[in-house]
Amino acid sequence: MARSAPSGSADKDLLRLITCGSVDDGKSTLIGRLLFDAQLVPDDHLQALARDSQRYGTVGDSPDLALLVDGLQAEREQGITIDVAYRFFSTARRRYIVADTPGHAQYTRNMVTGASTADLAIVIVEARKGLMAQTCRHSAIASLMGVRHVVLAVNKMDLVDYREQRFEEIVAAYAHLAKQLNLASIIAIPISALLGDNVIRPSAAMPWYRGPTLLGHLESVRIEASDNQPFRLAAQWITRTGSEFRGYAGTVLGGNVRPGDEIVVQPSGVRSRVERIVTLDGDLAEAGAGQAITLTLTDAVDIVRGDILAAPDRPPHVADQFACHLVWMHDAPMLPGRPYLMRLGTATLTATVTELKHRIDVETGVHEATKQLSLNEIGFANIALDRPTPFDVYDENKHTGGFILIDRTSNATVGAGMIRFPLRRASSLSWQVFAVDKAARARIKQQRPCVLWFTGLSGAGKSTIADGVEKRLLALGRHTYSLDGDNVRHGLNRDLGFTDADRVENVRRIIEVARLFCEAGLIVLVSVISPFRSERQLARERMAPGEFVEIFVDTPFAECERRDPKGLYRRARDGEIANFTGIDSPYEPPEAPDVHLLTTEMSLEREIEVVMEGLRDRGVID
Amino acid sequence: MPVPNSYLQALEAESIYILREAAANFRKPVILYSIGKDSSVLLHLALKAFYPAKPPFALLHVDTTWKFREMIAFRDRRVDELGLELIVHVNRDGIARGIGPISHGAAVHTDVMKTEALKQALDLHGFDAAIGGARRDEEASRAKERIFSFRSAAHRWDPRQQRPELWRLYNGRIHPGESIRVFPLSNWTELDVWTYIRQENIPVVPLYFAAERLVVERDGMLIKVDDDRLPLRPGEVPQPRWARFRTLGCYPLTGAVESRAVNLSEIIAELTSARTSERQGRAIDHDQSGSMELKKREGYF
């Protein structure tokens, strides 16, 4: 095994692979062994390895090859792999990118991340233990993420005396699992990463095995380009030079394209033809999947980032709802009804899970009913978008069928999904336009409708202040309606409890009712704890600009508990009520409320007056 | 025409995609231009990504005032040829305090004149994304770095709280004051960089090619006597030696290697038989294992 040949390297292709297995299975040792035996470890790294092996090593006097791979200090000290690390090596035939991910259940998200770009997965099984629950999980994720090739590496064969029978038992058991999971291309190799058997060198200890070594297989496996895919290019950037040049820069995400080809732009459905394929190295006669190009069209077409240029005979789906698998990647659970940002192709959308069908136990394959998804859980869900959007089914194209979800408050990447099929329900509903609208209804009442949203802890005084404000408005001849969180729970929301998922749905329904009353031309007063920023932001977005007034009734927790007007704090402290805001359920205070009432420093009259001033400033009252 | 699918074209296309994402996702992105070979490749890719328009980024060079003279000459020539905007930032406060690699040592100099200076420049100009040429193969903690890597308002990196990156979907959402470091060359190796430089005929600083240079041997490294600021230790006499640089930084901190490789093909041949890693010549990495991780947490590139 030499390092890559200095010349002719332009012919090499790129293989992206992922290794799955836990520390005990010897995953990091296997990768370390690949690099070590291929003589790809530089001398100064070997010296550092010898130093580190004395300090952290687990294999006596020999260099601990796993330490070559485990990069972050915390990992070395704890002896675990906590993140995805990328390793590179090169042979005369191929250039490799290895995503090294941890094996335990709490790192499912890391494996999903590594698998998203992998052509091939190495699933490591420890020969003594055989198939474990985590083998099922790794294989299920490989299947879910559409990894085409799987290598079953049966490791630590030295600990079972290199027995063929043990290997065959494991292979037979795995074949059964693979069939259930629809994994197609599988090869099994008996190895010892610690001693190097069948990793790069054929094993003298296992003459009964006649297949390729692990590296031998990696070198020869055929990574078929996904041919026969229809053309896709997600508009990424509009390139302009003055007025004369307008090109659409993007990466070909499927199929190929030539000048003269007809294309359709989705979601608009406008058609045009490719004029040129522009690159710095000259115009191209053809471009294929993976190439980053700039297209010009024969017509002046309105294209924005996020649009998809596609083959007109096999266009992508365009819909505002679809069904998908969803992997949750964040400590804060996924709550149906809560809006998230979605990145799909080059588009950024607002997305809401409308229905969570079930959660999948990836170790057993069992579907379980659930109201939310927690960190590392995988579910099947319907998602609604804020507008019709082009996409493909994930199995047909990962790049137009895979998406991530981003929390709108923290900006964290919280989930990832694979689209399984489009849903057409919304497109069969059309919006009925009426001649009498909000403006007309407001005019006859001679007022500006708006929503006064009182948020704060239980017992903060929201309803009392709202009641006082409503009386003043009534005295001024204004038409109002009051929605009280407690009262709504007696009727419309009586099916909901106090879990985070139910709280989100509770607030979502109140938002929609407030919106309807606002449409009716009324001034709506809403008093509801509404503990999460995301839902209050949703409320603001559902109303017209300037219509939503967020009023923070800021009473400290200790004061609310002291007042305890309904005896709820006492019952929560006694454990009679679960999920009580401020005790075992969080309250996220507004960062920039429109009106901020520090109730411990104000009288009730003053609080009402401050709200009225806010309404005067907005022109709601004179 | 068959679609070319070599690994270099795949890496190039991925980097161009990342540069376009950087342009589309941020209000005011900037390219961290360090004049080295990786920056040369980054610049070349940026020219490709937005052709026929110019890249929509300015270049930022954080100048420690201890760069090799040939680097500065090369920088000014390239920027002039390409007609790009160059912002040079020097930590004036560090200059006033007389901070330098010889008087204060590698660690303090790097912290004040590079890390602090970079943070100053990003804050001063309000850049919300800094695009750099760092590669995952350089060092173990870099191997876990994201392509869009989040930095807090204090420019800190938290390796335990990184955003997952799936497919080619990068999350560039930030609050005011926060920023993203973007690494388009994440998946390249040193050898890829040189092979690509040869394939694309990209200009690089002549210091990368072997020549007879006046050097002193110090702590196992060949230090080039680049100007009269290098105090010689007793017994040190600058000698002409055939040497070249694998990596370029501040001259008293960057060691040359013995070499006769005078052109790109010879450099590539030398690398394919090399037995030491690229950053071996960098004094700052050698304090202890994990030292790069510590520096990165504090905001080093």
Image (spheres, rainbow, N blue to C red):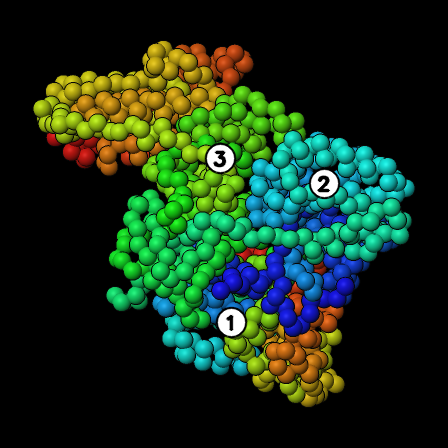
**Where does label 2 land, which residue?**
A22
- Residue B160 occupies quadrant: top right
Q: Where is residue B57 in the image (x, y as percent from the top left)?
A: 40, 64
Disc 3 marks which residue? A420
In the picture, measured across the screen, residue B243 lies left or right of residue A292, that is right
Chain assignment, label 2: A
Q: Residue A612 carries which label?
A: none
In this figure, which residue is indicated by the disc labeled 1? B40
Say if residue A235 shows up in the picture: yes
Q: How crowded is mark 2: few (under 14 residues within 10 Å), some or many (20 or more)?
A: many
Dividing the picture into quadrants, the one containing residue A493 is top left
Q: Mark 3 belongs to which amino acid?
A: Arg
Residue situated in front as seen by the camera: A320 or A467: A320
Chain to which the residue tagged by mark 3 belongs: A
- Chain hosting mark 1: B
Q: Is residue B134 visible?
A: no
